Amino acid sequence: MDIEYIFLAEFDIDKGSILKVQYPTAYPYDSEYSIANLMLPDGSHNCVEDTTVFFLRGKQNTQSDGNEIFYHVLNVQKQKKYEGVRRGARVKSLAIASKKPYCFSLRDLLSKALDQIFEAYDHTMYSKERRKLDDISELDDPNDSKLMDDLVQTLVEHIFETCNGIKISNTSIYSEQERIFWRYVVAKTKFTNYNHTASFQYGNRVDNITLSIPLCLSENEIQYRINGITQISLCRLVSTFKEDTMLIYNAILYQKRVVFFSSQQLAGQVVNAVLSAIAMFPEMHNLLRTRTFPYASFSNLEFLNVEGYIVGVCNPMFACREEYYDLLVDIDKAEVKVNQSFTEVHKELKKIEKKEKKDKKKRRGSKPNVLDAKYSTTPVSQEKTLFDSVLTDTLDIIDTIGNTVGVIKSKAFDDICYLTQDDLRFIKDLIVLIQFKTPKTNGFEMLEDLIRSKFYSYSKSIVDLAFDQEKQILYQQQVYHGTSLTQDPITDNIKKALSWRATLSFKHNKKTYISGKRQAYISPDIIDMKSCVQRLRSTVLNEEELITMFQLFIKHVNTREEILEFLTFFPENEGGIYPIALCTLHSSELMRLLSVSFLRRIESIDEGKLLVQNMNMFLLLGYDRGAKLY
């Protein structure tokens, strides 16, 4: 499992949080005090059990290669009551650190191991016979303490070896296209999890623990379960904050400081809310590694040095001081609060924008546009007039955003309060899907996968839009979610994409995006898949256009890699291969022949066969009929 460190921490009434064991060596990039405080968060003495996640960062000693050190840490904390002990209880935490996110599937094993550590204490220092001693100070015998420390050290080493004894090397390793297909096209967890039974032996006891290891997670996804229920859930986030979910979305996208706060719930619930919000951007590079701090306290404020941090806290002081956040997510009240200074800036900017618009119209008054073309006395071609109008609108947007968005000013403003029509339409559809569903409802896991798939598509469209603007200022009007070309020109999510372009996050993603094009096997010079999909889904194509398109598909989509890449453009949450299958019912015999032939090719790989089987019965009958005829 590639576990590199294991930590055991406990709370001491005199010393506070202390790190008792680090194995196999001391962690070199952070202090014991800092790690112990992360393992025992605020309010940990008030709960019986909690599970949290945090990250350990650092730089290698050799700065020449500049490789970043980043560890995922899974932490299980428990409290157990003891008579005769100050405060009446002992609080301990056990954590494992790994560079790979598979470690989170070991949560149940870690919980069982921590029980064994408590049991070891029960049979020695805190045994019933010793608890009856009148002189409590005798419990602190140095010899007993040394014996106990050695026993716990041995037990922790055994836990470490047990965790690393779990091998997943014999499981299927998915390629990038396969990962996207199974995670977002089909969007069913049962196809992407590896189930494994691990044995944990302590003394004469052997416990068998079933582990579910996710194999297709994106860079920003973390997944673990407690009692079979997924803890990181976009369904719960959306059902809690409703339309305000998109305010959180905007703030993260625009690289604002987002603070998740709760003083009434466990630290684990705060951590889950933070990680659920990050899951809205599954493919955004470095979002998790650089900007996300699932839990923080006043003893560790390193996140303040990070621009656009996303942090979870339990201390009310963070919520009371607006200088710590641009957006406050109050989990207890299910409310989202925007920093007041943003509202004031927003009002002033609206006044400035109106004035600047008037000035720009005067300066550009000599240039014709679509609206006043019919009143113009100067003969200008319709094509040139349309171009000038669209270009002027685009420049206005860029000018406005350039003045109001940026990472240089400490109080730069992006209108995170403004939800586009696409935002509202998107989130309302999700709310309808999620309403009345709970984690114990049948099909909740499938619904969670579907919601993640929808957020993947939505975020991908905005990222693609932003990089389209990198190539050309004049935005090529795209059809989004079936929107007509005549509706919302050069507005709506174009502003969202352009706002993101003004952030450091865009710069971090630029290199990754360019090197990781979705069309790695199908040449975009021959088939522009994005354009083809949009045309198939949202416009009525004449017979000649359809025939030409399908002939290109049949000619250039042949190998397994090409077919799989083709299918990643047809996620089931957006209808799957419905546009392809529908052509089997076309009035043209040639069109029916081409569509049936291409569906046969899709069926030649297992992934394609699954999508064909998932088509509705009406289309399946049409395909079967065509397959017999042709």
Image (tube, rainbow, N blue to C red):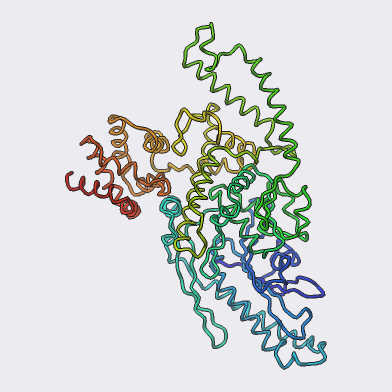
Give 529 or 620, whichever is nearer the viewer: 620
Q: Is residue 599 left or right of residue 536?
A: left
Residue lying furthest top in this view?
Answer: 377
**Where residue 358 sits in the image (x, y, percent)?**
67, 19
**Where residue 276 sits in the image (x, y, percent)?**
58, 55
User: From what the image shows, is residue 365 above or below residue 124?
Assistant: above
**Where residue 313 sits in the image (x, y, percent)?**
71, 58
Q: Residue at x 56, y 63 (%)?
A: 231
Q: Is residue 545 left or right of residue 464?
A: left
Q: Residue at x 66, y 60 (%)?
A: 56
Q: Is residue 414 left or right of residue 583?
A: right
Which image quadrant for residue 499?
top right
Q: How many numbered marks does the figure carry? A: 0
**Where residue 500 sits in the image (x, y, percent)?**
61, 39
Give 355 or 293, whichever is nearer the viewer: 355
Tell me if I can see residue 497 in this picture.
yes
